[in-house]
Amino acid sequence: MIPNTASSARQWVEEVARLTRPDRVHWCDGSREEYDALVAGLVRDGGLIPINDGQFEDCYLHRSDPSDVARVENLTFICTADREDAGPNNNWMAPDEAHRLLDGLFQDCMRGRVMYVIPYCMGPINSPYARCGIEVTDSAYVAVNMYLMTRMGAKALERIEREGTFVKGMHSIGELDPERRYIMHFPEELSIRSYGSGYGGNALLGKKCHALRIASWQARQEGWLAEHMLIVEIENPAGEKQYVAAAFPSACGKTNLAMLIPPEQFPGWQVRTVGDDIAWLHLDDDGVMRAINPEAGYFGVVPGTNRDTNNNAFEMLQRDAIFTNVGLSSEKEPWWEGRKFGVPVLNWKGEPIRSGEKAAHPNSRFTVSAQCNPSYSPMAEHAAGVPISALIFGGRRARLAPLVMEARDWRHGVLMGAAMASESTAASSDSDNGLRRDPMAMKPFCGYNFADYWKHWLSFGGRSDRLPGIYHVNWFRQDEAGKYLWPGFGENLRVLQWILDRCKGRADARETPVGNLPRRKDLNLQGLDIAPEALEGLLDVDTEGWREEMRKIAEYLAQYGDRVPAELAAERARVAAALG
Ligand code: SAT
Ligand code: MN
């Protein structure tokens, strides 16, 4: 399936091969046979370890280099001609300097290695909203992950040849040396260069690098949005289907919410997954916001996954899954904290477990095709995407943010998103357990200046009168003793039900300066065991705390200087004034 010499794809790949000097070039066709052969090769050289075949059919364990276990935000750069276009939210390097640096690293780096060429399509292959790319990589592990997570191979190449444009992604694991590790983006050239890491979002270039950083740039130019959002389908007993898209920072439960299992008190309700991490949102000709999931698989956090927290994920990990950085049990099964059964004997580095030590790395992950998800929605393959009723923002906040609040209008919703904050998690190597501002859960992923991004978000307000409602949720509120006030997981459907009913004008709320909140009676709490004080805490608005929060938001926005849209600053001032 190697394209002819006139093809721009072929010419670019040849150029990369001249720089990197691989022993061999392998164009991936995306077939199952190819996947099996790549897996067999990885098993031979130790890159994948087969795990208990009785229980887990065709499942494998990968142990990454211990220095390479998460995204590296401090080594991730946006390289635009004008530094201001990258903004204070990104590390920046001048494009020619970045190219010089990366050319030096890539030169001859694939000697003795195979170069895999992976044409891929982000989004349903026949969707007008989908976009293609080619990743070249010297990692077979990356190739098999891309097979599970994207639509890759011959079909994608066909589309690339037809369209003539694609995002160019160059990846090498290099020496896996943290001192020689860079994740570089050139949005003006639609290209990505990633060197020195084999992990997740650093290396699977279709995901954060293309579908968020580069795509957010393209989306701004073309009038759509590329967001760090799950997409979920909710069907009520009357057979009414509604869709919501929700943004949470990495490792805050997007996968669990996307695969939610309704509680017992919700007979007849069905929840299906359209996507668990990324949504591309477009306005259609009628002004309806429609979403596609550019991905075709999941790279989900493993620890904590069990039959109670996410039975669908638990089920889908029984076959054709790759586990990265989990421990192994005495039965040679993958083991992680919160799995609830089995005895761990080896930690994620493959060493005997010492007492008190965690078996799985907190950012250990599973890779699995969406086809294995028992709750996968057929609508995820729909070329036109799904109509979105509500957009939800959420963070991990022990204090202040209530269980749920509704923005009074689009502009207020954009402020809610821009003001998001969350406690840090293991998904980034720069985590420090503090609270950080993470606007729209895009802090690590927006490929341009946040001030311009907020302006772009605000512009939708004038483009349609059928926009989705905007909400903010917080499943992570704690009491003074550090105990979670809300049970979370399946019970989150109670909050989603209120949101969806609000969108249909069927539920009540009380107006507060920070947004509209449900009263106890507005929520379906039937059969839920929750203390009245807990509920009170969850639905309370701490006016003094919010005044302080509004001051902090003003300080945060001030970092972006004059570029902050006046409309956003005015909206913040309006809320602050309403708080008195
Ligand atoms: O490593 S990834 O960036 O793909 C996972 C995440 O942090 O969301
Ligand atoms: Mn993510």
Image (tube, rainbow, N blue to C red):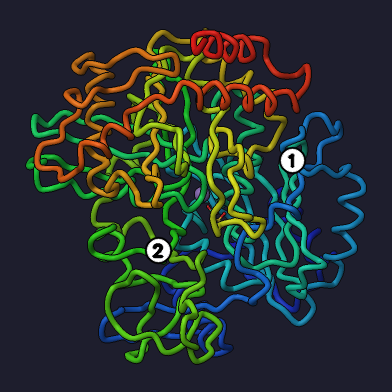
Does residue 193 show up? no
**Residue lying at 71% horizontally and 41% vertically, measured from the top left:** 190
Dot 1 and dot 2 residues touching (CB under 8 Å): no
Which mark is first along the chain, 2 or 1? 1
Helix, strand or loop for disc 1: loop
Residue 24, position as x, y percentages in the image: 71, 76
Whether 359 is drawn above or below 241: the answer is below
Residue 534, position as x, y percentages in the image: 27, 39
Ligand 1 picture quarter: bottom right
Name the kind of residue labelled 2 in the image.
Answer: Val
Q: From the viewer's perspective, tell me whether residue 417 is left or right of residue 516.
A: right
Whether 369 is drawn above or below 456: the answer is below
Q: Which mark identifies residue 368?
A: 2
Nearest the camera: 208 or 341?
341
Q: Which residue is mark 1?
A: 90
Whether 355 is drawn above or below 71: the answer is below
Residue 431, position as x, y percentages in the image: 62, 55
Nearest the camera: 450 or 192?
450
**Residue lying at 87% horizontally and 59% vertically, measured from the top left:** 103
Name the kind of residue labelled 1 in the image.
Answer: Asn
